[in-house]
């Protein structure tokens, strides 16, 4: 886990990644805040790669309150500060770019869109609703917006972008046979349902090529399946993984419940093992999900992951990587008395407290 690893043209100092996590920490105009910079600045030393929480590429693609934006050049100053902060101790900086699709917040946008007008299930952040179906020309505009977001990431000094194709956001809306009921070139067959994701990759690869930055990293985050019977299944996402490799994606990021042990229904192998076999030698495989110990990292690597993302544990213990390197005790809970030391943005701390047993909180 502490060995360096190369993603095509870029070398990471180790295989450990700060996973993308929402911080609810932007300023009210969706620019990067000082609180956000302090949060990342405290957690950038041990890992080889840091992936930011998602930044929306269009104003109607915002999925969380106080989610910083990348939809305008006006945000470049804050993005530059964020990239510089993340890279200060040798980690590579990845900007995660996203459109929330049918999970956009209706109290922040009056135009919630998706692949089709299929009712969105209720979440912890928003009630169910029926989104508006995107037109063909609007889909093309979204694709261009991802390209422009990538241009801004390059100009801001990030080392790469990660396309957020997971967690039921817009890209997954198109991939899912449950949510995508279209009968045009963007829906129906798997080939058509994959078209949106692959066109995004094509647009971003072209943007990177035009920049001349050959080391710039392109990642893609993926939820392998959906829980509903008629939803997206692993057989389809395995095909997508192979197509993403062919399209020039540098790493594939599997978002799982438990990185090293989660298995899809009907399979004897873990998700990581299945995808590792599919993309071996074609791209770098990363996984995240309930990594709270050195043993969990080793398990994920043993299943075939090349990179392992750490989320919650870097919130509770910013020195997690340094501690497992020396077999020191790791803090897995948040003490109210030490919140300031953890540099948790106030809105993030408020949300953590409101989310029940999401984190273990000590008095």
Image (spheres, rainbow, N blue to C red):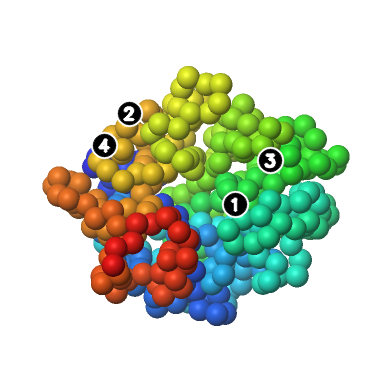
Sooner in the amino-acid sequence: mark 1 or mark 2: 1
Who is closer to the viewer here, 168 or 43? 168
What residue did someone put label 2 on? 302
Image coordinates of residue 42 in percent, x first then y, are 29, 66
What residue did someone put label 3 on? 175
Residue at mark 4 to residue at mark 2: CA–CA distance: 10 Å
Sooner in the amino-acid sequence: mark 4 or mark 2: 4
Residue at mark 1 to residue at mark 2: CA–CA distance: 32 Å
State the residue at coordinates (30%, 57%): 333
Classify mark 4: helix, strand or loop.
helix
* Viewer-nearest of discs 3 and 1: 3
* Viewer-nearest of discs 1 and 2: 2
Residue 332 seen from this side: yes
Seen as rendered, the residue at the extreme bottom is: 28
What residue did someone put label 1 on? 204
* Viewer-nearest of discs 4 and 2: 4
Is 329 situated left or right of 278 in this image? left
Classify mark 2: helix, strand or loop.
helix
The quadrant the C terminus occupies is bottom left
Image coordinates of residue 254 in percent, x first then y, are 49, 40
What residue did someone put label 4 on? 295
Seen as rendered, the residue at the extreme right is: 183
Residue at mark 3 to residue at mark 2: CA–CA distance: 29 Å
* Viewer-nearest of discs 4 and 1: 4
Sooner in the amino-acid sequence: mark 4 or mark 3: 3
Is 276 situated left or right of 135 in this image? left
């Amino acid at each position: 886990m502490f060995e360096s690893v190369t993603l095509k043209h870029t070398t990471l100092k180790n295989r450990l990644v700060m996973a993308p996590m929402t911080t609810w920490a932007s300023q009210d105009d969706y620019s990067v805040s000082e609180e956000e910079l302090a949060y990342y600045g405290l957690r950038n030393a041990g890992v080889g790669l840091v992936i930011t929480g998602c930044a929306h590429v269009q104003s109607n693609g915002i999925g969380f309150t106080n989610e910083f934006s990348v939809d305008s050049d006006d945000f470049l100053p804050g993005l530059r500060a964020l990239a510089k902060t993340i890279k200060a101790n040798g980690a590579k900086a990845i900007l995660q770019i996203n459109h929330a699709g049918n999970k956009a917040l209706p109290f922040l946008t009056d135009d919630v869109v998706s692949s089709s007008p299929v009712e969105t299930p209720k979440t912890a952040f928003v009630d169910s609703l029926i989104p508006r179906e995107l037109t063909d020309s609007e889909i093309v505009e979204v694709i261009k917006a991802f390209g422009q977001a990538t241009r801004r990431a390059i100009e801001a000094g990030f080392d790469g972008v990660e396309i957020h194709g997971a967690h039921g956001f817009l890209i997954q809306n198109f991939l899912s046979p449950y949510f995508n009921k279209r009968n045009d070139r963007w829906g129906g067959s798997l080939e058509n349902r994959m078209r949106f994701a692959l066109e995004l990759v094509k647009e971003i690869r072209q943007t990177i090529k035009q920049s001349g930055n050959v080391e710039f990293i392109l990642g893609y985050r993926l939820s392998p399946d959906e829980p509903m019977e008629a939803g997206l299944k692993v057989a389809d996402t395995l095909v997508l993984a192979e197509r993403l490799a062919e399209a020039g994606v540098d790493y594939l990021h599997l978002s799982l419940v438990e990185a090293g042990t989660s298995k899809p229904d009907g399979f004897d192998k873990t998700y990581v093992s299945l995808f590792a076999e599919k993309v071996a030698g074609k791209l770098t495989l990363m996984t995240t999900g309930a990594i709270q110990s050195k043993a969990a990292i080793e398990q994920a690597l043993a299943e075939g992951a090349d990179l392992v993302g750490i989320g919650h544990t870097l919130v509770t213990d910013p020195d997690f990587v340094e501690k497992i390197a020396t077999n020191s005790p790791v803090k897995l809970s948040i003490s109210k008395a030490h919140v300031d030391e953890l540099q948790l943005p106030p809105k993030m701390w408020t949300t953590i407290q409101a989310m029940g047993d999401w984190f273990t909180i000590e008095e």
